Amino acid sequence: MKRVTTRPTAPSPIGESVPRRDGPTKVTGSATYTVDVELPGMAHAQILRSPYAHARIRSIDAEAARRHPGVVAVVTAQDLPDVNLLYGHAIADHPLIATGKVRFAGEPVVGVIAEDRATAAEALRLIAVDYERLPFVTSVEEALADDAPIIHEEPGEQRSHRGFEEDIERTHPNVCSHSRQAWGDIDAAFEGAHLVVEGEYRYPMCYAYAMEPYTSVASWNEGALTVWSSAQHPYMVRDDLARCFGLPRGAVRVVVPFVGGGYGSKSYTKIEPLTAALALRAGRPVRLALTVDEAILTTRGDAATVRVRSAFDADGHLLGRHGAIHLNTGAYAENSPLVGRKAANRLGGPYRIPALQVDCSTVYTNTGPASSFRGFGAPQVTLAGESQMDEAAELLGLDPLEIRRRNLLDPGERPWPRARGIDADLKADLELAAEALGWDDPLEPGHGRAICMSASDAGSEPITTAMLRVHADGSVTVMVGSTEIGQGSSTVLPQIAAGEMGVPLDSVHLLQSDTGAVSYDRSTGASRTTTLMGLGIQAAASDAREQLVAWARDAVAQNGAPVVEERGGVRVAGTFHDWGSIVRAWFGADAGEVIGRGYLRRSGATAEMPPFWEIGCVGVEVRVDETTGEIDVLTLVTVGDVGAAINPQLVESQDVGAAMMGLGMAIREELVYENGNLLNGNLFDYRVPRTTDVPELRTIVVERGDGVGVYGAKGGGEGSLNPVAAAIANAVYRAAGIRLREAPFTPERVWQALRERDAGR
Amino acid sequence: MHETLEIRLTVNERSEAVRIEPRETLADVLRERLSLTGTKVSCDAQVCGACTVLVDDLAMSGCTFLAADADGRSVRTVEGLARDGRLSPVQQAFIDHAAFQCGFCTPGMLMAATAILEEHPRPSRDQVVHGLEGNLCRCTGYEPIIEAVLAAADAGTVDEGVAGW
């Protein structure tokens, strides 16, 4: 790892690569995940799923299953008249269990609760469902045909204050949402153009493959509900559960143990309402642990078709960009309307564009629902936008780096009116990547290099609270709603607290992601936790110190002696008093504590949206095998422009992980539907990167202190995924003279393109 | 009631006698009957390696290994790697190199790495890369894991592995 640091110094241990605090528990097997939660009397659920993509349910005969020894209860939608069955983050269109019809193959139809999983699985085979099959659509083209079957006869209720606030204009009954991003005079831009580049680019349906499949445990007690779940956003899940079961939010407790990978796929509510409904009817605690094959059907990423035209002047300056994006969002909206909004925002990329108009529709199809997935629209549209930059460079006779230098936004420049100015030095990042990749070094035949960039409006919403308690012995408890999904929040957040309180890291303890115990945080996603919860903790620490200084004046200083705050305590008349001694003096006992509070909202430094820009800057060198069509990614350069790296080792780890995930999606990963069924819904046939796929890595972590967070921090962990497919496509063009516009770039597609190239000669 | 049988096996050097159903896998028995929940199940199809345990010193997928076949054999799991409260070199190297994020693949990854180091006390990078090809990790991009295993080899591997150097 190379570090480029120009930010101001921060108090230790902020900025230090301290070991992950979850290390010992994770390497000894004692770390608790939701599947390890055991409750007295807990029963186990299995789900009968629809074999059909689109069908009406005529009847369900579950009598034999109910009588099967060991079965506790069998639950269909008809057994839940007291539950509001519809949930969904942006649009409440998703029944927690099929009601009347099924909209994708794999939709839950019946839940069986038994003494153990195997018995529940046996009972599933005793259930007979009579389906009336309906015509189905699995592609956007089919779904938008005039005579397409309608997937949602009645539109679901659009939810307010969920991030997607636009009026939904349904130009076709299968359109789920529509977003437009536009500024400038688009017609004039294209009329005055020297060059217009035009193309259609496709990004596949992908599966996040969090290795821990969705798992929830639900328990009812005196009308209050407790749910343990593998969820990224416990407070969002709490609110949805309260809505489904008609409970006050305070009566619902959501606890998130360690999460076995998220990548956005565990954002928002998934199987928690179903698990809670099963527990309600079972009258016992219930665990629902999906298999990976079921998890693939539960959430995937939005596939995209991106038609885009870019207008340039003779010097390669962008004049305008016009785009039409269609996302295949599957059977239910989930959070795809917001993915669509962000895809529209992100097609412009990190460039100065005088005029832009992008329309993005999310479209219902009879496939497994799509929702949040690392990058959130950016990987899909960056393939299109960054391919066009290289296509234009070639036609204008410019170096691909030079055309980028001429168009990249300057620090502080607003990508669109009223957006926060860019909080990064994009041109400097580009040069760092070029140097690391050896841009000007001679290329071997069959090799190609490319560098691609992205800028995402990230950070979600600045709605965050934090509590920081200083105990009588001077130790500190930090309480936050953020989850530990592997990103390292359980290490980084205590680092910030220790630095801000001036106490040793060992004396800081973190309690997180339990809505019954810690205070509100909107979500753990959009790369927001280090930045926004970091600010929340900084505010809570400041509040605690302010109270402690006042207590020192009250209980430590004699005769109005001045109290001077120092790192970790105060000095009074030449004597240092640490925080613990002030607590003890104020309470007059070895007891008590001070409670610091931090609140963050759209105000002050976090008034402008987005809270920060997440930068992607990736370089690759590839070799193309002309015989097999295989792409070998030889070198991968990542530039993690994170403003301030609270823990550089963890930043590097995020960047490498993100880029490798992007590599998988660029060259291999794709969910394939045929006849309404997912063909490759398992880990045999959906191949994710392995150790043998790791290229030579060159990582750079950049800290210029230009983010809104503590010491200039801003988010990372998605940026290095977003430009990978585009970088590989552009490098392959330089290596082999073929322009790949449809990911993944499988050997078959590459081989086909090579043959077409040769035929054209 | 389903038919049951009793198996006797050694788990992390402790003798165990367990009454099981023939359909139970080794991962089921470890997790549900012996409360050794460190072993995780992910793909449930012998692809991902999350459930890797050592059976008579060979790395096996606990999700597809029938528990009945473990009768009379010696099984090691992630819970048995640390000795007297001291982490094994490979466990320590995983912490030093941040060779995990979410940690769900880590128990299986550690067992596979332990098997590699027992077979090749000073493995080449290639031996580590190919030895871990059957263990998936979606968080780290693998590089820190490969580096950790190589570093653990340099630090001295478990027990008898050290002697031959």
Image (cartoon, coloured by chain):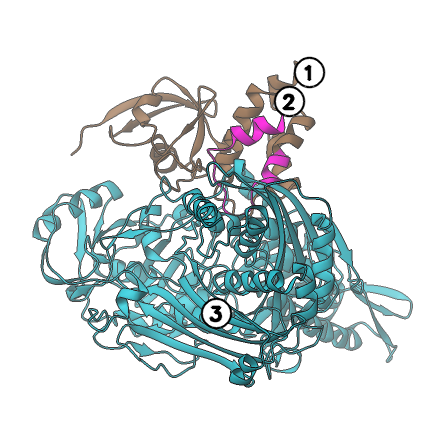
Chain colours: A cyan, B brown
Work out which quarter of the rendered image holds the N terminus of chain B and state it.
top left
Q: Is residue A160 above or below residue A135?
A: below
In front: A213, or A296? A296
Contact flag, marks 1 and 2 (Cβ < 8 Å): yes
> Which chain is disc 3 placed on?
A
Which residue is nearer to you in this view: A547 or A199?
A: A199
Q: Which residue is mark 3?
A: A308
Q: Residue furthest top?
A: B164
Which of these two is toward me, A41 or A532? A532
B2 on left or right of A528:
left
Q: Position of residue B159 (x, y in %)?
A: 61, 20
* Residue tagged 1: B165
The percent coordinates of residue A559 (x first, y second) are 87, 79
Q: Amino acid at mark 1?
A: Trp
Q: Is residue B143 magenta?
A: yes
Q: Amino acid at mark 2?
A: Arg
Q: Are marks 3 and 2 on the same chain?
A: no
Per the model, the C-alpha gap separating discs 3 and 2 is 53 Å
Q: Which residues are magenta?
A: B124-148
Which chain does tag 1 point to? B
Q: Which residue is mark 2?
A: B122
Q: Is residue A564 left or right of residue A666?
A: right
Q: Is residue A327 left or right of residue A524?
A: left
